[in-house]
Image (cartoon, helix red, strand yellow):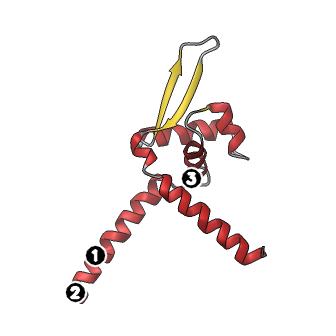
Amino acid sequence: MTDNNFQIECKKHLLAIHDTMDILNGKWKVSIVATLCYHDKRRFTDILNDVKGISNKMLSKELKDLEVNKLVKRTVLDTKPITVQYELTEYGVTLKPIINYLSDWGKTHRDMIIGK
């Protein structure tokens, strides 16, 4: 592979990483996706309790962003009172291996830094 081809391939990979980071950016999105990876369906309040420190307004905004990017599906159930559930879409489920790798890396890093 020539130097020029290598640079072109590198730019393609970096562009893909930037695209991914644009979708999952911010303090909360990865945590929201993670809770939906570990639970099939969650109500708004459940996610609010799972993701410590997030406000109602921010959770609502982040869920809408994830929905726009086709990672999360919002379902309104005909109950009294009305129940809204969130779950990963089929496309969103493709993030599960990434979430698992992040979790594994985080555990390893924590052990390395603070010991077992």
Mark 2 surroundings: few (<14), some (14-19) or many (≥20) residues within 10 A: few
Residue 68 horizontal/vertical position (percent): 42, 39
Are the residues tagged 3 and 2 within 8 Å (C-beta)?
no
Q: Which is nearer the N-term, disc 3 or disc 2?
A: 2
Q: Which residue is mark 3?
A: 30
Q: Amino acid at mark 1?
A: Glu
Q: Amino acid at mark 2?
A: Met
Residue 88 horizontal/vertical position (percent): 48, 40
Mark 3 surroundings: few (<14), some (14-19) or many (≥20) residues within 10 A: some
Q: Is residue 74 above or below residue 103?
A: above
Q: Residue at left 54%, top 33%?
A: 86
Q: Which residue is mark 1?
A: 9
Q: Residue at left 72%, top 73%?
A: 111
C-alpha gap between disc 1 and disc 2: 10 Å
Q: Residue furthest bottom?
A: 3
Please indicate whether residue 109 sits to the left or right of residue 7 in the image.
Answer: right
Q: Nearer the viewer, mark 1 or mark 2?
A: 2
Disc 1 secondary structure class = helix
Q: Which residue is mark 2?
A: 1
Q: Amino acid at mark 3?
A: Val
Quadrant in which the C terminus is drawn: bottom right
C-alpha gap between disc 3 and disc 2: 35 Å
Quadrant in which the N terminus is drawn: bottom left
- Viewer-nearest residue: 65 or 1: 1
- Viewer-nearest residue: 74 or 99: 99
Q: Residue at left 49%, top 52%?
A: 96
